[in-house]
Image (cartoon, rainbow, N blue to C red):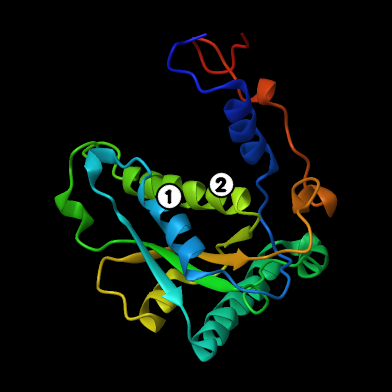
Amino acid sequence: MSEHAYSAAERAAIYRVIGERRDMRHFAAGSVSPEVLHRLLAAAHQAPSVGLMQPWRFIRISQRELRGRIQELVEAERVRTAEALGERSDAFMQLKVEGIDDCAEVLVAALMDKRDAHIFGRRTLPEMDLASLACAIQNLWLAARAEGLGMGWVSLFDPQALAELLGMPAGAKPVAVLCLGPVHEFYAAPMLVQEQWAEERPLSDMLFENRWGEQP
């Protein structure tokens, strides 16, 4: 055991919050206090980022009318996605894909503009800005679970339409609509597993050694 390791109880708490994080779609009435919201966003802001570019930008949606317009964009894309799914369209339309109207807080996570100026770590992998934002979202997600709050990542929207709605500058790009707030309970398993839409695959299917496809 490394001398830098946390205590057994602390390690157990970290692995527990990772294991119990869920992409939530069902929310209960309630609110998120300003103090807790600040803690969650501070946790997101502590995420690693390539070249320390910190490409994340968060927009808190406090206007109910604006929240409704975002939900309309999501619904329009939900219908288009169903059409693209063909024979699974009816089953998809039965899924609850967002909790925008029900959650306590809505945040839009976006990539900043003028990202092309940052080439440290991005010269051959420009998508590392997106990876950095994803780390920030994951920090927020885990912190929310530790606070007893649910969070859901909604990606069903036209990025250009959402960017225009929120007055984003050229080059900025919305990546996630985040629904945050109290829940009645957390899903025992990922919702798509519970709804029999998909099955989780074991880590062993994703782990190779030395060469692609070679199992350890």
CA–CA distance in space, label 2 to label 1: 9 Å
Q: 211 or 71, which is in the foreground?
A: 71
Q: 191 left or right of 84? A: right
Residue type highlighted by circle 1: Ala
Query: Would you place residue 196 above or below residue 5 in this image?
Result: below
> Would you say the residues marked 2 and 1 are in contact, meaning their CB atoms lie under 8 Å apart?
yes
Residue type highlighted by circle 2: Leu
Residue that carries the numbered disc 2 in the rendered image: 142
Residue for point 52% across, 8% down: 1
Q: Residue 176: x percent and y percent?
A: 49, 62
Quarter containing the C terminus: top right
Count residues near mark 1 (Cα–Cα under 10 Å), then give few for <14, some for 14-19, many for 20+.
some
Q: Is residue 176 visible?
A: no
Residue that carries the numbered disc 1 in the rendered image: 43
Q: Which mark is residue 93?
A: none
Q: How many marks?
A: 2
Count residues near mark 2 (Cα–Cα under 10 Å), then give few for <14, some for 14-19, many for 20+.
many
Q: Quadrant of residue 10?
A: top right
Q: 182 left or right of 189? A: left
